[in-house]
Amino acid sequence: MRLIKHGHSCVRLETGDHAVVVDPGVFTDTHALDGATAVLVTHEHPDHWTPDNLRATDAPVFTIAAVAALIREQAPDVAERVTVVSPGEVRQVGVPVEVIGEKHAVI
C-alpha cells in the first residue's frame, strides 16, 4: 500500500490494481487522478473537488448527497458516475471504505 499526498486536501491510496483518490480539489494537479479507479469526495468545498478534476478521470465518484447535487449542476457530464453514500455504509472501492460523518466543522 502506498499513500501519496497531493497538495492541500488530496490523498491518493495505491494498493494492487487500485488507486483511490480522495478530495481532488482546486489545489490538486490533475495528474493525481491518472489511473484512478475510484474518487471519494468528502464535502462541498472547492478545495475538495472541482468539475475539471472529476473530468480528468473516468473513475466512479463516491460522495454525499450535497456534493452529488452540486456535481449535477456544475458537471452534469460527470453525474452518471456518481454514487451517493451515507454515514454507516461500507463500500468496496478497491479497499474497504467506511463512510463516517457528513458535516464539516459544525460549530
Image (cartoon, rainbow, N blue to C red):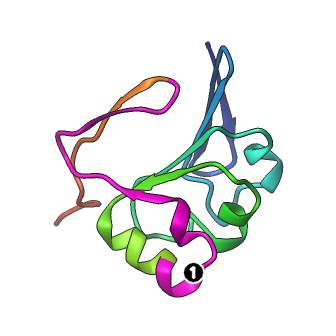
Image position of 97 with respect to 44: above or below: above
Spot occupied by residue 81 in the image (x, y as percentages of width and height): 54, 60
What is the residue that sits farthest to the front in this orientation? Answer: 80
Residue appearing at x 33%, y 60% in the figure: 64
Q: Residue at x 33, y 72 (%)?
A: 66
Could you classify mark 1 by the number of other residues whose Cα lies within 10 Å: few (under 14), some (14-19), or many (20 or more)? Answer: some
Is 38 placed left or right of 64 in the picture?
right
Above or below, comparing residue 6 to residue 98 in the picture? below
Asked which quadrant contains residue 43, the reply is: bottom left
Question: Is residue 48 shown to the viewer in this render?
Answer: no
Name the quarter where the N terminus is drawn: top right
Quadrant of the image occupied by residue 16: top right
- Nearest the eye: 76 or 22: 76
**Viewer-nearest residue: 7 or 20:** 20
Residue where numbered disc 1 is placed = 76
Q: Is residue 91 left or right of residue 25?
A: left
Q: Which residues are magenta?
A: 72-94
Say which amino acid is labelled 1.
Pro
List x then y, in percent, for residue 67: 40, 69
